[in-house]
Image: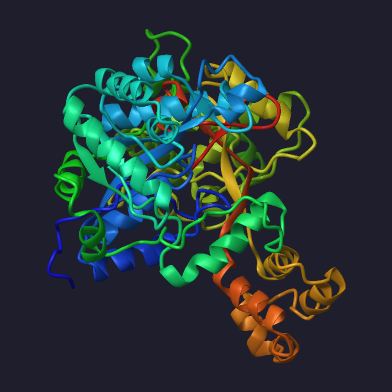
């Protein structure tokens, strides 16, 4: 615990979700916040908001305020321009959400950057920022921000003009000039220029550290991570790298010692943290409307379809078993319908039944149902599942329980060869690709892959790396377990400094997200999805979103 606890908060920070660039894992980050007595921390990954949901949930559980943001890429002209000049002229800008409106605007900006502005990087432009600026706080970013770049070019008029634009666009008190201390001599020139602009234009400063790794000793591992990203080796002196060993999660005392001389810069981090208060509503469901007309009652449509399907199923059951206890079945369907209506889920059942029916109509094989949904008579009646729950002694309350309100969880299996047809039907039926998407999943640096990636980055011959990777058991949970099961791995690595470094670095980097891909699950909403979450382009029609 430091004497300056509660005086400084990190507002510019890249987690593991700045893929192959940030190396800060969420759990160790929050642990470090506790150690430094910081009760708030930001997430500002490059061009994405992949980790926002996990970060928000973990931080709140740890008693730490999550400050949700993104370091966006700003095009020098417009996102419609895509030339090498537009790529090389990109600038960075940190945006933080103050409230739900700011969060929604940030989601829209990040989505537009990915879906329409992507050219080497996901880009926004000044016009887009002006259109979606409410509820956002801006920070001038690192040396790649347009204000620092103008200062480095001795273009103070350009720096002033950029500062005025952000101040006018985001509003008085919503734009801050970043000062940093990263050990680079050019940063001192930028800091002095920032201080001059602050005094000249009355724009407040804020101290940041552009954190990319958690501890100072993680610098080498992070350097190798950048090599994995770029496909380069550490021996190449001209490769992309950070000319600093200071981009770690510093304590309040360290930040005050190096940046405390800039008026208000430390104190303003507390002010910004206090103003960022995004609250997610996890009580309200945002179901799309199944009914084509606002005059139709979804509750009544659900009741009609469930009862009609039930009568058909009951007739089949009675034909097979004339002595069946009919009243038991009628009591069960009435009970389930009441519970589903009381819990507010009729639309959910209508929509699931709808796309299952369409799949069968076009000849796409559908599974019989699995998991707790098989305990629902309503699901059976609406042809969502193919099992009679009473005949098989299955309990409805394992699926839906009024004493524990949660979303129904219906697992539906479609044949892989026709799944895309069902997905496209869902897009067309429920509003288009703005309303329907698949979710994102992440490929990670797993045991064998991380050994190979790190070995390649260190320039170790492929045959030698492959020899070690092949010793890792296929079923090993992680590298640590593999070392316990196969001591020979460490013995081989211990014979040379390079291989020892490879193993130790691999242990540090294992499990970090490597790339994004598409999960089979589908999300459907009542409004354009970018009002709730950021979107990323997927393959083919539709989008998937970063969670």
Q: Image height check: is 2 above or below 202? A: below
Q: Is residue 383 left or right of residue 471?
A: left
Looking at the figure, which quarter contains the N terminus?
bottom left
Q: Residue 538: in sight, yes or no?
A: yes
Q: Residue 276: in sight, yes or no?
A: no
Residue 401 screen position, x and y as percent: 35, 50
Q: Is residue 64 left or right of residue 79?
A: left
The residue lying furthest to the front in this view is 154
Coloring basis for residues: rainbow
Residue 243 screen position, x and y as percent: 51, 55
Q: Residue at x 20, y 66 (%)?
A: 37
Q: Residue at x 42, y 54 (%)?
A: 184
Residue 454 screen position, x and y as percent: 68, 67
Closer to the camera in the image, 325 or 65: 65
Closer to the camera in the image, 89 or 51: 89
Q: Is residue 36 left or right of residue 445?
A: left
Closer to the camera in the image, 485 or 377: 485
All told, the count of numbered labels is: 0
Location of residue 532 by image quarter: top left
Residue 49 screen position, x and y as percent: 45, 40
Q: Is residue 54 left or right of residue 315?
A: left
């Amino acid at each position: 615990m430091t004497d300056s606890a509660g005086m400084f908060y990190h507002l510019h920070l890249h987690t593991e979700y700045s893929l192959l660039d940030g190396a800060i894992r969420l759990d160790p980050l929050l642990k470090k916040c506790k150690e430094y007595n910081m009760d708030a921390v930001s997430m500002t990954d490059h061009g994405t908001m992949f980790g926002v949901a996990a970060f928000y949930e973990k931080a709140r559980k740890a008693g730490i305020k999550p400050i949700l943001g993104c370091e966006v890429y700003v095009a020098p002209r417009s996102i419609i321009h895509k030339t090498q000049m537009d790529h090389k002229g990109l600038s960075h800008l940190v945006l933080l959400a103050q409230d739900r409106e700011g969060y929604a605007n940030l989601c829209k900006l990040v989505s537009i950057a990915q879906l329409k502005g992507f050219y080497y990087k996901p880009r926004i432009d000044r016009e887009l920022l002006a259109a979606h600026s409410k509820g956002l706080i801006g920070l001038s970013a690192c040396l790649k921000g347009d204000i620092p770049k103008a200062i480095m070019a001795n273009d103070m008029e350009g720096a002033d003009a950029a500062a005025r634009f952000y101040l006018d666009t985001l509003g008085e008190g919503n734009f801050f000039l970043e000062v940093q201390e990263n050990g680079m001599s050019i940063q001192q020139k930028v800091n002095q220029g920032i201080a001059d602009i602050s005094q000249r234009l009355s724009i407040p400063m804020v101290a940041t550290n552009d954190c990319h790794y958690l501890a100072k000793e993680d610098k080498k591992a992070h350097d190798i991570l950048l090599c994995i990203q770029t496909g380069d080796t550490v021996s190449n002196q001209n490769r992309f790298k950070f000319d600093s060993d200071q981009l770690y999660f510093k304590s309040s005392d360290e930040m005050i010692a190096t940046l405390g001389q800039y008026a208000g810069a430390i104190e303003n981090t507390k002010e910004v943290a206090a103003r960022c208060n995004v609250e997610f509503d996890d009580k309200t469901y945002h179901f799309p409307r199944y009914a084509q007309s606002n005059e139709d009652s979804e509750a009544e449509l659900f009741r009609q379809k469930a009862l009609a399907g039930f009568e058909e199923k009951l007739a089949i059951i009675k034909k097979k078993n004339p002595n069946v206890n009919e009243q038991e079945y009628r009591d069960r369907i009435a009970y389930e319908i009441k519970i589903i209506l009381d819990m507010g889920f009729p639309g959910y059942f209508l929509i699931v039944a709808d796309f299952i029916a369409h799949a069968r109509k076009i000849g796409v094989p559908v599974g019989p149902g699995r998991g707790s949904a098989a305990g629902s008579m309503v699901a059976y009646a609406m042809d969502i599942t193919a099992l009679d729950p009473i005949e098989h002694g299955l309990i409805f309350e394992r699926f839906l329980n009024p004493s524990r309100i949660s979303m129904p969880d219906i697992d539906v299996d479609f044949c892989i060869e026709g799944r895309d047809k069902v997905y496209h039907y869902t897009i067309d039926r429920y509003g288009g690709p703005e309303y329907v998407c698949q979710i994102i999943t992440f490929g990670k640096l797993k045991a064998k892959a991380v050994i190979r990636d790190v070995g390649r980055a260190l320039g170790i011959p492929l045959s030698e790396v492959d020899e070690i990777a092949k010793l890792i058991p296929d079923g090993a949970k992680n590298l640590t377990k593999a070392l316990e099961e196969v001591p020979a791995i460490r013995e081989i690595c211990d014979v040379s400094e390079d291989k020892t470094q490879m193993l130790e670095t691999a242990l540090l980097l294992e499990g970090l997200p490597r790339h994004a891909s598409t999960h089979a699950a589908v999300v459907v909403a009542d409004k354009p999805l970018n009002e709730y979450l950021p979107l990323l382009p997927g393959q083919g029609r539709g989008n998937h979103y970063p969670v």
